[in-house]
Amino acid sequence: MAGQAPAAAGNKIPAPGQSPPYKAPRTADGKPDFNGIWQSFVTADIDVQDHDAQPGPHPDIMGAYGAWPGGQGIVEGGEIPYKPEALAQKKANADKRMVVNITSDPHRHDTGDPELKCYSPGVPRANYMPFPFQIIQGTDTILFSYQFARAVRTIYMNPNDKTIPKDAPADSWMGWSHGHFEGDTLVIDSTGFLPYSWFDRAGDYHSDALHVIERYTQVSPYHIMYEAMIEDPNVFTRPWKMSFPLYRRMEKNIQLVDFNCTEFVLDLLYGQYSKRPGK
């Protein structure tokens, strides 16, 4: 094409979704090195499926500040295989995603989007929120530290450590995770989830039977291809998969900054119980 410079020899650009062969650098124990700060650039936190742009809450006063962007989904095949009754619950969740019902029990989590209330985001949602996270890799454990709500995960990598139970000692927001390497791919198997976290703001959800198998594969010095297989027989008719790239943050002296959002939601959650002047 006139006016277009030819590609340099040997610099073939891979097609979208494809990656050239890459050998990741190694840690001292010979494993692929995943240390670093990473971030996704998808809009799946709004909706893991294809979605149009939409106004946010109170567009009359927030204008474009509160608007949510449209985006392509990350669900392979395009649709989540809900059971009929679970799909109805998903739609009810979406309708009430901004409802906060804390009347008789201040610790209730079963109304509204947990992100709205600054609860831990759960897995895999923590990986595609619009915030960076850090991987700190050791020999027996790998730590994931997330900027949103100070959420953390510990991945247990030593299957011979008898002090670490195989099954979750108690359900939690971020689950109970064991990992291993398959070649250059880090595989993380997680169960033991509380049933309160959502996959997105669109109300996609799971039960306490959630089982997530994640695969992290470095495809360049700056990219990880991420996959998560989702299984929950209480909610879905079959397992389903999501996938997207993670990008290494390359700014000089990059670090996570504090976003402990609890202080921003205290009035939302507990304002009705606070004492006000004249009342």
Image (spheres, grey):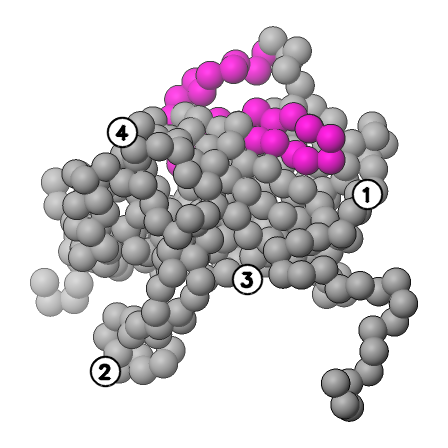
For the question of whether residue 106 can be seen, the reply is no
Q: Nearer the viewer, mark 3 or mark 2?
A: 3
- The first of marks 1 and 4 along the sequence is 1
Which element is circle 2 on?
helix
- The first of marks 1 and 3 along the sequence is 1
**The disc labelled 1 sits on which kind of residue?**
Lys
* Left or right position of 268 against 48: left
Q: For mark 1, what is the residue?
A: 23
* Left or right position of 175 against 18: left
Q: Residues within 10 Å of mark 4 (few under 14, many from 20)?
A: some
**The disc labelled 3 sits on which kind of residue?**
Phe
Q: For mark 4, what is the residue?
A: 234
- The span from disc 2 to disc 1 (Cα, nearest Å) is 52 Å
Q: Provide the residue span drawn in magenta.
A: 163-188
Is residue 273 part of the magenta span, yes or no? no
**The disc labelled 4 sits on which kind of residue?**
Asn
**The disc labelled 2 sits on which kind of residue?**
Asp
